[in-house]
Image (cartoon, grey):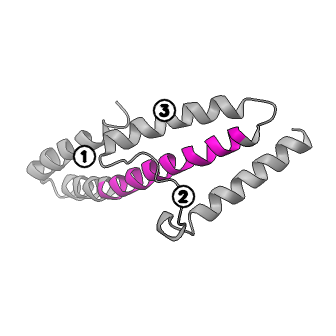
Amino acid sequence: MNMKRSAFFAASILILGFTTFVSADERPGHFKGKSANTLKQAVINFSEHNAKLEEILAKESLTPEELHIVHEWTYTLENALNKINEEFLELAEILEKVHIASETADMETVKNQGLRYLGIARQVIK
């Protein structure tokens, strides 16, 4: 990997790292990004914007305008990741209920919570 690309990736990691410590509310005048009110919308936004990011990062170098575009996209990606993380915390709790119920031969809970689990999980992975 050449020096320019290494420096870019290092800077990108630092910038993205800082975004986890400072919320969008604490950065006035910044973009909001596309909202992700549902897991389905979060997955769509995440997939679409990752594809866009992958395409632009494939270039040898980026213009200031392209860096600005990437900056805008990170807000949508952050919104999507926040929603996905929120939903996956709940998903883990549901799976734990299935796990415990399967150990205690609670067929009703296994079926009910298992179907609930799959309903959420299949929104991400089929």
CA separation in Å, label 2 and label 1: 36 Å
Looking at the image, residue 35 lies above or below residue 46: below
Using the image as rendered, state which of residue 50 and residue 107 is in the foreground: 50
Query: Which marked residue is nearer to the observer: mark 2 or mark 3?
Result: 2
Chain-order first, disc 3 or disc 1: 3
Is 67 contained in the magenta span?
Answer: yes
Q: Position of residue 97 (x, y in %)?
A: 23, 58
Which disc is residue 30 wearing? 2
Looking at the image, residue 22 lies above or below residue 118: below
Crowding at mark 1 (Cα within 10 Å: few <14, some 14-19, many 20+)? many
Residue at 88% x, 43% y is 4
Specify the amino acid type for callout 2. Answer: His
Residue at 50% x, 52% y is 78
Residue at 13% x, 52% y is 109
Residue at image mark 3? 48
Instruction: Please tell me whether mark 3 sits on a helix, a strand or a loop.
Output: helix
Specify the amino acid type for callout 1. Answer: Tyr
CA separation in Å, label 2 and label 3: 21 Å
